[in-house]
């Protein structure tokens, strides 16, 4: 029967997932409690092997958060004061914060208004402007926003032309594919987050770095723990405390067993949203040969605030990612951006609305959400 009301509808349903694997989670956590190696225990090494395999890369380093997974490569590559790193403004704080914290300069680049991801043409014109003004371009941080890979072919060709390396912020896109290959090996380094609400999330903070570059891998591994090279605890460089917990690794190992299935389910949910909504508002566009993991399903509408409050009245949660572009926020004021500004970023910030999205969203509930959106638009 068609649903006519909902209560406590979650934006992301972690409870259904937990119920599905609860027994195995309990056993896995119990094993950690028994062996007592709470930090960097055997589960951590196992999950690093699994994550490298899953993403087709040679090396994986787990660490304390997605933010650390971005910081560590910048430290290893010696990104420092006055170096310029190109990054979108339409993203989560960390993507640019990690650059500024190194004393380097985030140069904000505009996005493609259909995909929310960095626009390759805008990137190239930004690099030219930076060079003309005497800046020192060093790297690019791409962000696979909402789970969709950036247009790697176009971005990589610009990066190669100007001899810049790419750090891919895949905090939202672990599990996505580009040209039939998993996210992880397109950029020189890929960083992801295991924050609980991410497509692959643990039950605390966590992150991972993926690379095929052995030299960089060794440097990053040492930076993760105070610049130590071996167990003698003698620092070779400055580093961090960014080790991964065994309990979190144990949780991830269990979640990885159902992850492929969950990615398929997320795509089914997204397909239904797009099929049912594309004629009444702007739905997200996935570029050719890419497959999103749908960390968020984000619609575009000039009436997003009224849609959001109508949904809220019906018990349907929605969220704004991201209403405040970074270049307009206090810590980032004054950093460079293209002379023409960031018109797509600023416009989309007023139009985006993310809908409930998770692998356990049943069709009845999803059609209830879709009907409510139709009513909101008619009203
Ligand atoms: C695009 C993006 N980058 C980086 C991060 C930072 O990850 P964490 O919260 O694990 O530090 C997030 C987390 O929300 C994110 O969405």
Image (cartoon, rainbow, N blue to C red):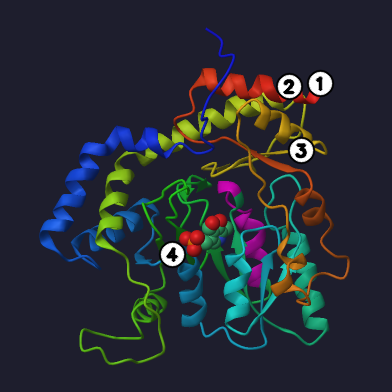
Q: Nearer the viewer, residue 56 or 242?
A: 242
Q: Residues within 10 Å of mark 4 (few under 14, many from 20)?
A: many
Q: Residue at x 28, y 59 (%)?
A: 49
Does residue 286 appear left or right of residue 170 in this picture? right
Look at the numbered disc 1 and give the secondary structure of its residue: helix
- Mainly helix, strand or loop, the magenta region? helix
Q: Nearer the viewer, residue 144 or 40?
A: 40
Confirm if mark 4 falls within 8 A of ligand 1. Answer: yes
**Contact (CB < 8 A) between labels 2 and 1?**
yes
Q: Which residue is mark 3?
A: 304
Judge whether 112 appears above or below 240 on screen: above
Does residue 22 appear left or right of residue 148 in this picture? left
Residue 104 horizontal/vertical position (percent):
64, 83
Look at the numbered disc 3 and give the secondary structure of its residue: helix
Look at the numbered disc 2 and give the secondary structure of its residue: helix
Residue 86 horizontal/vertical position (percent):
68, 71
Label 3 vs 4, first from the N-terminus? 4
Q: What span is in magenta?
A: 146-160
Does residue 263 appear left or right of residue 316 in this picture? left
Label 4 vs 1, first from the N-terminus? 4
Q: Nearer the viewer, residue 14 or 127?
A: 14
Q: Residue at x 88, y 65 (%)?
A: 340
Residue 191 seen in render? no
Q: Which residue is mark 4?
A: 65
How far apart marks 1 and 3 lie (CA) works out to 13 Å
User: In which quadrant is the C terminus drawn?
Assistant: top right
Label 2 vs 4, first from the N-terminus? 4
């Amino acid at each position: 029967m068609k649903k006519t009301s909902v209560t406590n509808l979650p934006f992301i349903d972690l409870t259904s997932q937990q119920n599905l694997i609860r027994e195995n989670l309990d056993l896995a956590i119990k094993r950690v409690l028994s062996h007592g190696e709470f930090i960097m225990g055997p589960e951590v090494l196992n999950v690093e092997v699994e994550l490298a395999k899953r993403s087709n890369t040679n090396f994986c380093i787990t660490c304390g958060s997605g933010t650390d997974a971005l910081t560590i490569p910048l430290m290893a590559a010696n990104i420092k004061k006055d170096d310029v790193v190109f990054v979108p403004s339409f993203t989560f704080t960390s993507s640019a914060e990690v650059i500024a914290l190194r004393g380097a300069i985030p140069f904000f680049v505009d996005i493609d208004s259909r995909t929310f991801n960095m626009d390759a043409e805008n990137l190239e014109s930004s690099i030219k402007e930076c060079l003309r003004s005497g800046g020192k371009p060093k790297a690019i941080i791409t962000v696979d926003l909402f789970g969709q890979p950036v247009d790697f072919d176009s971005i990589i060709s610009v990066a190669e032309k100007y001899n810049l390396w790419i750090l891919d912020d895949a905090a939202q896109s672990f599990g996505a594919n580009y040209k039939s290959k998993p996210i992880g090996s397109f950029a020189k380094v890929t960083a992801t987050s295991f924050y609980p609400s991410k497509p692959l999330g643990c039950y605390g903070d966590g992150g991972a770095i993926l690379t095929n570059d052995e030299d960089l891998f060794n440097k990053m591994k040492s930076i993760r723990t105070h610049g130590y090279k071996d167990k003698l605890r003698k620092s070779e460089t400055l580093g961090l405390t960014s080790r991964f917990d065994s309990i979190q690794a144990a949780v991830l190992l269990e979640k990885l067993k159902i992850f492929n299935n969950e990615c398929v389910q997320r795509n089914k949910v997204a397909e239904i949203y797009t099929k049912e909504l594309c004629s009444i508002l702007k739905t997200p566009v996935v570029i050719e040969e890419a497959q999103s993991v749908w960390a968020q399903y984000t619609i575009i509408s000039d009436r997003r605030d009224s849609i959001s409050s109508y949904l809220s009245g019906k018990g349907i949660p929605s969220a704004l990612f991201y209403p405040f572009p970074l270049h307009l926020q206090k810590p980032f004021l004054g950093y460079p951006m293209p002379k023409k500004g960031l018109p797509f970023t600023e416009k989309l910030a007023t139009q985006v609305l993310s809908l409930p999205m998770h692998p356990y969203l049943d069709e009845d509930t999803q059609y209830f959400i879709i009907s409510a959106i139709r009513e909101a638009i008619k009203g």
